[in-house]
Image (spheres, rainbow, N blue to C red):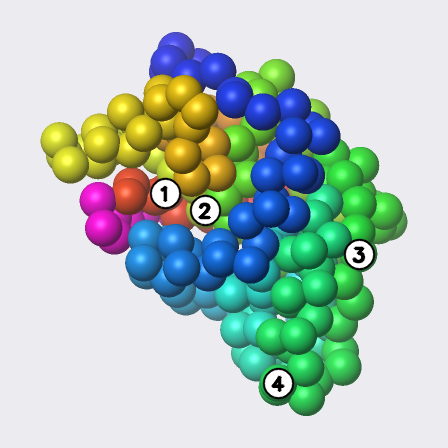
Amino acid sequence: MNQEILAARYTHQEIIRKYNLIASFYDIFGVLAERKARQRALEVASIRNGERVLEVAFGTGLNFVQVLKRNPRGWVDGIDVSNKMLEKTKKRISKIGQDNYALHLGDCRRLPFADGTYDLLMNQYLLDILPVEDYLPLLIEFKRVLKPGGRMVLVHMTKGEKWVNQIYVKVYKMKPPLLAGCRGLMARPFLEEVGFKDFHREFVTQLGFPSEVIKGVKR
């Protein structure tokens, strides 16, 4: 794993404060720069109605409600560290009238779920704000709660392929940093390290913001 990944800007407590602060307007950036990657993640996940699904770091629920709509006969859990994000997600879910879900406030590094519970785990824009030393323990925890053959679909900022993508690297290095503190990475080496297989990876860019959608399977 020789890739250069910039140092994380925030501690765990700072992340909680940051996301509580930006919850009220996060959707603006989510729609302008992340919508295409989030949509591709849903398509790559190929949710089968009746599955047990976990979304880690569900944020304001942009994808959570879409997972629910695709899985009315299944069950969907979500976990996030931000109570403000959780409140916003609850309001968003209330508009679709489904009750086959539970939202949890907690630390995604220690998931409160049993081994082998889920057919699918989804996560958007988390690895890119965490310290690199958290990656392997976090992915091991993700793998733990998946069933054998379970799928994991991750989305996060990645390494840019064009000059316009480098704008976000410059933004990240600003003091104080703008946005939520995302920086680019390529996740496959870390997924391989913890034993995921059968990868599918796509590069998606929107408003110049470079995202990686990557799926791995627990074997």
Instruction: Mark 1 vs mark 3: give the one in front.
Output: 3
Residue 93 drawn at (x, y percent): 65, 77
Occupied quadrant, residue 163: top left
- Tell me if 177 is positioned left or right of 195 in this view: left
Kind of residue sitting beneath label 1: Glu
Kind of residue sitting beneath label 2: Val
What predominant SS class does the magenta segment belong to? strand
The residues colored magenta run: 199-208
Q: Which residue is mark 2?
A: 155
- Residues tagged 2 and 1 counted as in contact (Cβ below 8 A): yes
Kind of residue sitting beneath label 3: His
Q: CA distance from mark 1 to mark 4?
A: 30 Å
Q: Which residue is mark 4?
A: 95
Q: Residue at x 68, y 39 (%)?
A: 16
Q: Secondary structure at mark 2?
A: strand
Residue 30 drawn at (x, y percent): 42, 56
Neighbor class of circle 4 (other Cα within 10 Å; few <14, some 14-19, many 20+) is few
Q: Secondary structure at mark 4?
A: loop
Count of numbered badges drawn on the protein? 4
